[in-house]
Image (spheres, coloured by chain):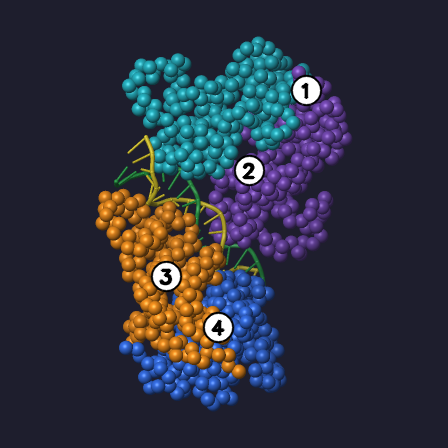
Chain colours: A orange, B blue, C purple, D cyan, E yellow, F green
Amino acid sequence: MPAALAEPSRALRRPRRAGTAAVAPAVAPAVAPRQAHADSRAPLVLDAAARLFCHQGFEGTKVRDIASAAGMLPGSLYRHFATKEDLLVAVYLRGVEQISAAVETAVQPLADPWERLQAACVAHLEAILRDDDYARVVVRVRPADVPGAADRLTALRERYEALWRALVAALPLPRRTDRRTLRLMLLGALNGAQNWYRADGAASPRVLARQFVTLLRESQQPLREPS
Amino acid sequence: MPAALAEPSRALRRPRRAGTAAVAPAVAPAVAPRQAHADSRAPLVLDAAARLFCHQGFEGTKVRDIASAAGMLPGSLYRHFATKEDLLVAVYLRGVEQISAAVETAVQPLADPWERLQAACVAHLEAILRDDDYARVVVRVRPADVPGAADRLTALRERYEALWRALVAALPLPRRTDRRTLRLMLLGALNGAQNWYRADGAASPRVLARQFVTLLRESQQPLREPS
Amino acid sequence: MPAALAEPSRALRRPRRAGTAAVAPAVAPAVAPRQAHADSRAPLVLDAAARLFCHQGFEGTKVRDIASAAGMLPGSLYRHFATKEDLLVAVYLRGVEQISAAVETAVQPLADPWERLQAACVAHLEAILRDDDYARVVVRVRPADVPGAADRLTALRERYEALWRALVAALPLPRRTDRRTLRLMLLGALNGAQNWYRADGAASPRVLARQFVTLLRESQQPLREPS
Amino acid sequence: MPAALAEPSRALRRPRRAGTAAVAPAVAPAVAPRQAHADSRAPLVLDAAARLFCHQGFEGTKVRDIASAAGMLPGSLYRHFATKEDLLVAVYLRGVEQISAAVETAVQPLADPWERLQAACVAHLEAILRDDDYARVVVRVRPADVPGAADRLTALRERYEALWRALVAALPLPRRTDRRTLRLMLLGALNGAQNWYRADGAASPRVLARQFVTLLRESQQPLREPS
DNA sequence: AATGAATGAGCTTTCATTCAT
DNA sequence: TATGAATGAAAGCTCATTCAT
């Protein structure tokens, strides 16, 4: 995820090819300037939008705010994005890409299903609590609150949740366990932290995530339908 | 007004305390008619606002919508509430009152701390998923999304969460357990259900709540700070 | 038509009942004030819109212009009309109503088809050249130039042209005469006058109209397909 | 007209001096290629503008549309035309040139004034109904709708109408006939056809034109001031 | 000559709120 | 108390035009 954060605008345009991104600029530095000029401001716009959507919500953010945060006039913004909703979708897309990458990176070296789940929680929580304005927007802005983009937003969220479905599917659980509820409960608990977590608190996102998973993990022996 | 707000809404919903609602008018019949008549539309406004805020969010709900849902014109609405934010606060207040009452009622006959927690979860979940537009607004509308009322909204939420603080404080847990995190995690998981719960699904709010608590309860042996 | 012009706002709201309009106010003068207050500004808006659409075209007229000509702010206009297009349609509607009334009134006392046609031309020309901003808009603003209202505008024009279809149908003409072409040619010639007629010119609309019809009338013996 | 089409961009800037156009390149052949190449896109722009102005009107056509229809970007367009209004004037100019040429060509071999008028009508109608986007714009776009170019547009129309003044002046008519009204009425009727003529209709522009003239011609015995 | 991002003024429309009646 | 027309600030967006490259 740090890597993803370091080259944010690229992720929007090109297919993610691991390892290539860091090398390419070094190989063809002469091309970079031209490209950089061509759409140098678009990533600025996206960054500004992500920051503002994340802090003030979608409705609370005015197009003028985004423009001026990006150092341009409102009209100029529409060279890059047709509507405010499209801008949100672009932020969402990259948020999903980045948090997906973060989770995948965190999970990849691990084999044990519970360890993988915990690593995913850590990555998720760090992204939505601290690191990543884009990822934070994905959690902060509710699809249903933006009618003009609800479908696209929901589809993007779905894409990310597929990751979690796989993680939960791999857990060794009693047969009758409702894995869907387990997944949604866990994500709900994680995302809810955005409402109360304060950076200056005692627990880091990492510690918090471990607590969450421990909670879940130890409980799985008796997850049964209570009478 | 708090009294007025507390009274009509109760009568509207359930005979929460049988006999009381019907008696009150009889006690003060001389004042009741004029006042009752004069105020008779305010609860309508509040109900309409609760329903709309709950379904469309705060920004998504227009004052005109509320007024027309209450059978009046926008101007008339301002006889009862000074601002749209005040209206939201009033809904919030009653939402907190009602969900508090629901939880307290559910918890009261029980003695075992875990049983009390589970009963609270059931009551909370039934309120925010099904029963109570007012309570749903409390979960649905994020204080931070309404700058003009954020403080008051947060204070009301606090008031409700005090209940949960007590419930969690009563749990027999290892000394080092972070009860604040436990509480917030649980509430986050419960509230998150509003985003994905569908009434036609397999699990009722009641079953869902039991799953949540079982999850928590069984896990409390090892909830310790990971190294 | 003079009657229609004398009470313009009424025509928009009530079905035209000949003779009643002039009497009603006298019969129930007590009701008038309340009614007059209720929508006192809406006719002002409509009049202002008609005048401006007529002089500057639809695109050339800004909502702000209409509002300030009506003595209000742009936002206030939307109490009365949902969109600028709707306002145009309302003007069109009344334009059609008024010019229809003018033509019908002029034609009614006459029996001879050619005399009726000539009277219709006089009425039409007087309306679109001098008397009636509303009627002028109907000729001035081309439906195709206002995509958002083209259908409704065309339908209204159709309604008016039906009158002319009847007038032309009644003419004693050779069987093979293409009456549709005759009608459209005549109306085209009449409407075209809006582009070049100047009030200070030698010929009045009345004289002009007579010239047009004479032109047509005398030619009808040989209107045949030339070889 | 074909000649005019063959040297489009030149006609735009200089007064037409017969014979010069073909010679100039021969005189300075060294310059021609670069110039010719450089100028090669301007006619494309003009054609695109004519097509779009004709189909969507002036206001309805965006500079971007023209540019992209001409295969260039908006900024590039301003190498050729200083303003959108200038572009319209250029289209108008060529429209007038082309329809004038068409009418003159049609009229030239004929001697009889009525036959000449009829030939002019045929040529005019074919141009504005079918053949010629440029000529269509002249009829479609009303000078008064483009304040920034109204004077120039009117002047160009005047130039074309001079032709018709001559044609009408040559007609053997009773002395008291108002030839100006006759001319304007006829042109109004012809131009009005643009609003209702459909290519799939029964009558071709040619047949239509003949009907129009027959109409006029036969009527001229009694075109007198009615009492 | 061509690009295309940027400009900036201006557009139509929205909406919480006010106020004369 | 209720009305509903009016307010006025601000919103999202458009578009002819400019300008550094």
Q: Chain of mark 1?
A: C
Toward which corner of the image does residue F16 lie, by quadrant?
top left
The tag earlier along the polypeptide, 1 or 2, is 2
Type of the residue with mark 3: Ser
Quadrant in the picture for the C terminus of chain D = top right
Which residue is tagged 2? Answer: C144
Which residue is tagged 3? Answer: A100
Image coords of residue B52 (percent x, y): 53, 66
Q: In the image, is C142 to the left or to the right of A132? A: right
Q: Which mark is nearer the camera, 4 or 3?
A: 4
Q: Residues within 10 Å of mark 3 (few under 14, many from 20)?
A: many
Residue B188: image tag: none
Image coords of residue A24 (percent x, y): 26, 49
Q: Residue at x 46, y 21 (%)?
A: D97
Type of the residue with mark 4: Asp
Residue located farthest toward the bottom when viewing the structure as drawn: B111
* Disc 3, SS: helix
